[in-house]
Amino acid sequence: MSTLEEQIEIGAPADAAWDQLHRIADYPRFVEGVLHASARGSHRARLDVAVDGGHREFDAFFTDRGHNRVMTWETVDEPHLRGTFALRPLDEHRTQVQVRIEYEPAAVEELFGGAPHGFALASAIERTVRTDLEQLRDLVEHRMR
């Protein structure tokens, strides 16, 4: 299992970033490859994701500890992916968002294609997560205007 950790500062209060993470239907706006997303009750979501020229639906289970501003998620089926979003208020107008993703490189490569192995695959995933965080930041900051 490989682990990726990234973080970004958002020019918005933690409540604004927290609310955005819970707007499942908005995931296509900031998560690369997500074509459609919908909540399935209070702790599940269905994500339609672009996969190697086609698409595939995934179910994910979410758990959040709102008081601590930590959301964890995990795919229900293959490939098994899991992650955590942690929000840390820096002051009343800035928030640090940290993401941690655990994945099986071979399963990700098989499903999504792309970079061949090892460092190249890890670099591609890191770039994607960094871009997703930047798009999340832009979306939250835009909503604050």
Image (cartoon, rainbow, N blue to C red):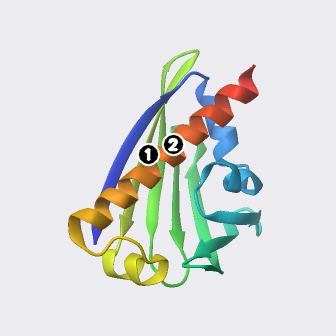
Along the viewing direction, whichever of 100 and 68 lies nearer the viewer: 100
Establish if 7 lies above or below 106.
Answer: above
Q: CA distance from mark 1 to mark 2?
A: 5 Å
Where is residue 145? Give x, y as percent: 75, 19
Image quadrant of residue 24?
A: bottom right
Q: Quick one: which residue is furthest to the left in this view?
A: 119
Residue reaching furthest top? 92
At x 70%, y 65%, the residue is: 35
Residue 111 horizontal side relative to residue 37, left or right: left
Count the labels in the image. 2
Q: Which residue lies at the image location 73% right of the left edge and 62% below the top edge?
A: 42
Q: Which residue is mark 1?
A: 130
Residue 29: percent from the left, percent from the top?
69, 49
Q: Give the quarter of the image for residue 103.
A: bottom left
- Sort mark 2 into few (<14), some (14-19) or many (20+) by Cα contacts within 10 Å: many
The reply to whether the C-beta atoms of the residues labelled 1 and 2 are less than 8 Å apart is yes
Category of crowding for the residue at label 1, using alpha-carbon neighbours closer than 10 angstroms: few (below 14), some (14–19), many (at least 20): some
Q: Nearer the viewer, residue 37 or 49?
A: 49
Using the image, tell me which numbered label, if any, was put on residue 97. none
Q: Which is more toward the observer, 85 or 32?
A: 32
Three-letter residue code for mark 1: Arg
Q: Quadrant of the N terminus?
A: bottom left
Q: Position of residue 142 (x, y in %)?
A: 71, 27
The residue at the point 64 percent across, 46 percent down is 21
The residue labelled by disc 2 is 133
**Which amino acid, mark 2?**
Leu
Looking at the picture, how far across and down is residue 57, in whole percent?
66, 79
Q: Secondary structure at mark 1?
A: helix
Residue 42 drawn above or below residue 116: above
